[in-house]
Every structure is written in structure tokens, then in C-alpha cells.
Amino acid sequence: MSSEKIFKGNIKPAFTDEELVRFLQEGGPQRYFSILADRYHDYVVKKCRSYVKSDDEAEDLSQEVFIKVFMQLKSFRSEAKFKTWLYTIIYHTCVDYLRKKKKNMHQVISDKLSTELEDVIEAEEVDKESLHNALELLLEQITPEEKLLLLLKYKEKQPLQTIITTLNISESAAKMRLLRAKEKINKLYEKQIGSGR
């Protein structure tokens, strides 16, 4: 039975995100995109708000995100999770916005990651201010892709396999980058603790 026939009775079918994307990639009607947009509207606005802290800015950014999602649907790979792929678009859109506004994106990302990265620090007790400072220094030294990797792993709690597929990197590259970031933040944290004594 085609997806078109299922729609005829005004009943909204429980298609998965990936099925809806596939229908759209195959030239299906635009209402499939409306279902996706309705499904993720609140999620996208909430994620955007965590970067900009303003309802109006978050709403504007969410509109931009959905436009990008629509334009980039052809590049979505079915083995990836739609929600994780969507998060990468939210991240790039918000970071670009912060950069244009000359806002401190390191500060914003650092705020988002601080509590999650406490477990990464190898010291017995973690001083939150020193961790925050170390994290800001770390974020200045790594690539945007590595920042996204950290957010997906520690903030969004995505499994490594999902991250690998979404970012289109090898397992060894993902593990190496995470390990390198972990080692770097520990060194920077030690330095912060040392300078605070």
C-alpha cells in the first residue's frame, strides 16, 4: 500500500521520521514535511533557546533550521537517526548566528557542557569554576566538528555509533577525538587548579 493511500482518511499515520524523509526524498507531497515540522517544532525551539536565551531569537532560528532541513533533505542518509542529524543542523545554525552577532559561542557551549563533563575530569573533587575555565580554553583549541562531537556525546547522550553515522566519520576517528578532548581538558583543568593556588 502506498503512503499516499494511507493518508486519504484524514488519519495522521504514525510514520517514523526516517520514513517521512524517504517519502520526501522520493518526491512525496509536502504535507510529509509538515508532519516532521509539527513533530519537532518544540524540540527545535527549545534547543535554539538553549543557545540564545531569547524566545523571539529562538523562534526565528527555528524557522531557519526548518528551511535548512528542507533544503538539505536530499543529503540525509537513511542509516543515520533523523533527530541526531536535525541536532547537527540546529548546532551549526545557532553557532553561525552567535558568530555573526559577535557573541561568545565558547561561553554558550561551555555552559551547556560544564555539568556533563565533570565525570571526564580525573581529579577526585571538581572545582566548577576551574572546570568552566578549562572548558572554555579547550573549546578555543578544537574544531567546530569536535565541539559538536562533545555535545552529541555528553550533552545529547547519543551512542557513539549514531554519532559516527551522522557525522560521517570513522569509529577510530570519533574515539580518538573524544580521547584527545578528554586528555586536553584534564591538562587544562590541572593548569587552572595550579594557577588558582
Image (cartoon, rainbow, N blue to C red):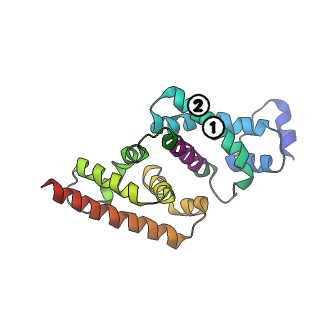
Name the quadrant of the C terminus: bottom left
Left or right of residue 43: residue 128: left
Where residue 120 sits in the image (x, y, percent)? 32, 60
Q: Which mark is residue 64?
A: 1
Q: Are marks 2 and 1 in contact (CB under 8 Å)?
A: yes
The kind of residue on which mark 2 rests is: Asp
Most common SS among magenta residues: helix
Q: Residue 101's spot in the image, x, y percent?
A: 49, 38
- Nearer-the-camera pick, 194 or 159: 194
User: Residue 19 shows which numbered tag?
Assistant: none
> What SS does tag 2 mark?
helix
* Residue name at image x 82 percent, y 36 percent: 7
Secondary structure under badge 1?
Answer: helix
Region in magenta: 86-97
Q: Is residue 68 left or right of residue 88?
A: right
- Marks 2 and 1 sit apart, C-alpha to C-alpha, by 7 Å
Residue in the picture at 43% in, 40% down: 103
Q: Amino acid at mark 1?
A: Glu
Image coordinates of residue 123 in percent, x first then y, are 22, 61
Residue 117 lies, with reference to residue 58, above or below; the image says: below
Reading the image, the residue beneath label 2 is 60
Q: In the rendering, at what x and y percent does residue 178 appear?
A: 43, 65
Residue plotted at (22% across, 56% down): 192
